[in-house]
Amino acid sequence: MSTFKAPRGTYDLIPPASAAYLAVREAIAAPLKRSGYGYIETPGFENVELFARGVGESTDIVTKEMYTLTTKGGDELALRPEGTASVLRAALEANLHKAGSLPVKLWYSGSYYRYERPQKGRYRHFSQVGAEAIGAEDPALDAELIILAHDAYRSLGLRNFRILLNSLGDATCRPVYRTALQDFLRGLDLDEDTRARVEINPLRVLDDKREAVREQLTGAPLLRDYLCEECKAYHAEVRELITARGVTFEDDAKLVRGLDYYTRTTFEFVHDGLGSQSAVGGGGRYDGLSEMIGGPALPSVGWALGVDRTVLALEAEGIELNLPDAVSVFAVPLGEEARKVLFGVVGQLRTAGVATDFAYGGKGLKAAMKAANRSGARYAIVAGERDLAQDVVQLKDMESGEQAPVPLAEVVEAIRSRLA
């Protein structure tokens, strides 16, 4: 047994469970690929200042949860706690916003890191699939992204998720609301850290999960009552477009995301079967983020969906994904000559697109057939010296137990036709 274990709050993806994670990633990415989103991959670490500016210096992510390090050269880096700031940085660096028509539509998949108290559904290392549409201010784009996430979850068979929707206003109306909210919050019995947050970013107090704080928020002013006419019209169109596609949602006037860069449309996907960690994904519009990190004005919108929590949601609904077999055929050679011949057959099957494995290690017939059973293969190819002398192999159906000789020259086509 190894001396080392995975760090606290992390996990290893191991077969066969890892197949579900791959299937979830592919299902989330599929509607994005069909909608003009190109794949982007960014480094696992970035300059600390990118997240301090973009995510927000007052957020828990930056002040408490970000893993930081200093390189030998003195650079201050952070393991990425989220994807949007990194993707926007990469798009700006590559001048994608100048390369063609806007929006620039990108999707990504990867690991992210936050120093949090580990519990089921909340890890220090987690996986997300995300999408960003950069450089266009259009309610149809906000609606498109919400619908694409909805369609991805539906394609996985999920039914018991809800979409929460709100508007956070913009630079015109939010300052007025901010002042009203601060006036309200200053009258509450809050701890010193929360009082400091009231002065820096009062909307973050609305996102506080502690019951002692939430009880006092009853009667807090709501942003929807302070929206300017433009933000009202924008939000109304988003709602109208989503509804027209048959996607249901719930208006949540207290919904605020935990990142400072959000403006106008904000949304969250929640699953009630996950307990306290009910959010499986979320996102929204972030029209000022590009300027925050030194770029031009590029109104944008995006989301990130948690792969880990989506898998937990599938388990909560008792959904078993229809995963392809890891192995369809297992080759069992009996003797050295059969080992060489069947190794060649295995190569031919793989070239033909058939998932095939081999009894490595010189196993005897009994041990090799046990390995074939464990692999989940539908068929086993067995051959010994007598079979090869007749230019045949034995093809065994692992479900029915039936076995019959097949000419060696025809075995690849025979298996392909049976699997089809």
Image: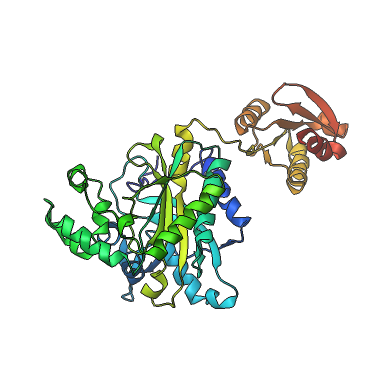
Is residue 103 positioned above or below 259 on the image? below
x 73%, y 39%: residue: 339
Question: Which quarter shows the C terminus?
Answer: top right
Horizontal and vertical percent for residue 205? 23, 54
x 81%, y 40%: residue: 412
x 58%, y 77%: residue: 99
Horizontal and vertical percent for residue 375? 62, 33
Evaluate whether residue 130 shows in this view.
Answer: no
Horizontal and vertical percent for residue 288? 39, 70
Horizontal and vertical percent for residue 21? 51, 44
Picture quarter containing residue 374? top right
Q: Report the side of 395 relative to 294 (left or right).
A: right
Is residue 137 positioned above or below 127 on the image? below
x 51%, y 68%: residue: 136
Q: Nearer the viewer, residue 182 or 11?
A: 182
What is the image's colouring? rainbow
Q: Nearer the viewer, residue 135 or 249?
A: 249
Q: Report the side of 351 relative to 49 (left or right).
A: right
Picture quarter containing residue 39? bottom right
